């Protein structure tokens, strides 16, 4: 129930203007305005700024959901005491998203469990907050989905979606070998996004180790060469980060 100091007429006006979420913070704001004797013009600016911020946060949240990002994987909750090593200066630079502005890629590489996926998702969340289009998917699900898309004639449309986003995140690439169709899709994604769009790829393997996993040697060489020579290498090493996320009593 809303506090009594918000009149029914004000409540109705706010709802008609589709500003209903403002009612949750309005009572506290009104108390602050009265206590500090805030001028009317400043009151209006503060209330509208609150709404602008709320809408921005909601838009960012929706972009992150549409992108397939884990809501818990944000840099604010990254455990700085985790026993992993990486180039902190590089991560700070990547967080500015200059690599997206320059159409560069990021290869987040290291052993199982050190937080590669976490960091990739965290950079994706930053991009969403900047208003950029992001898509995130595991390599296995991505290539299976593209293969299935050939059956219902939606393959071209699916590839166009992958080409169109500002940032494409492919997680856990290189866990298994790709067949000829999957290799072709991988080549098309790398080729189309080369110098046009950015990617973050997480992998337990170095790019040189990808070559035997790809079915077509020519496509493999071309794709890997384009990617690795246009990518920042964020190498993460150490103990499994997942142990920090283990449930405690």
Image: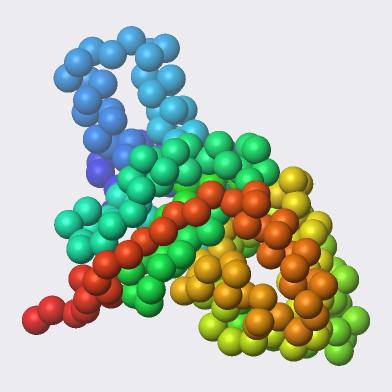
Q: Can residue 114 be seen in the rendering of this structure?
A: yes
Is 19 positioned to the left or the right of 147 in the image? left
Q: In the rendered image of this protein, does residue 22 appear above or below residue 116? A: above
Q: In the rendered image of this protein, does residue 55 appear above or below residue 150? A: above
Between residue 207 and residue 234, name the one nearer to us: 207
Between residue 75 and residue 59, name the one nearer to us: 75
Is 196 positioned to the left or the right of 203 in the image? right
Is 221 positioned to the left or the right of 80 in the image? right
- Indicate the quadrant where residue 207 lies: bottom right
- Indicate the quadrant where residue 187 lies: bottom right
- Indicate the quadrant where residue 46 lies: top left
Q: In the rendered image of this protein, does residue 145 appear above or below residue 170? A: below
Farthest right residue in view: 153
Farthest left residue in view: 249
Residue under the image location 32 percent in, 64 percent down: 237
Residue under the image location 22 percent in, 28 percent down: 31
Residue 61 position in % (x across, y down) = 49, 54
Residue 146 position in % (x across, y down) = 76, 80
Which quarter of the rendering shows the N terminus? bottom left
Q: How many numbered marks does the figure carry?
A: 0
Which quarter of the rendering shows the C terminus? bottom left
Between residue 69 and residue 203, name the one nearer to us: 203
Residue under the image location 46 percent in, 64 percent down: 109
Between residue 100 and residue 216, name the one nearer to us: 216
Residue 128 position in % (x across, y down) = 54, 49
């Amino acid at each position: 129930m809303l506090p009594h100091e918000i009149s029914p007429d004000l409540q109705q006006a706010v709802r008609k203007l589709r500003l209903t979420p403002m009612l949750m913070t309005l009572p506290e704001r009104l108390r602050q305005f009265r206590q500090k004797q805030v001028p009317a013009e400043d009151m209006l600016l503060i209330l509208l700024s609150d709404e602008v911020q709320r809408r921005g946060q909601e838009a960012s949240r929706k972009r992150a959901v549409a992108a397939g990002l884990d809501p818990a994987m944000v840099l604010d909750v990254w455990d700085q005491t985790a026993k992993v090593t990486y180039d902190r200066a590089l991560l700070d630079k990547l967080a500015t998203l200059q690599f997206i502005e320059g159409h560069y890629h990021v290869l987040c590489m290291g052993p199982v469990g050190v937080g590669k996926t976490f960091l990739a998702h965290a950079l994706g969340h930053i991009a969403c907050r900047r208003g950029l289009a992001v898509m995130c998917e595991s390599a296995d699900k991505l290539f299976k989905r593209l293969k299935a898309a050939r059956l219902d004639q939606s393959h071209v449309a699916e590839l166009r979606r992958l080409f169109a986003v500002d940032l494409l995140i492919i997680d856990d690439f290189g866990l298994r070998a790709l067949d000829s169709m999957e290799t072709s899709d991988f080549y098309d994604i790398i080729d189309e996004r080369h110098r046009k769009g950015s990617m973050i790829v997480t992998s337990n393997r170095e790019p040189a180790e990808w070559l035997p996993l790809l079915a077509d040697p020519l496509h493999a060489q071309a794709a890997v060469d384009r990617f690795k020579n246009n990518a920042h290498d964020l190498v993460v090493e150490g103990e499994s980060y997942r142990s920090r996320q283990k449930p405690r009593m």
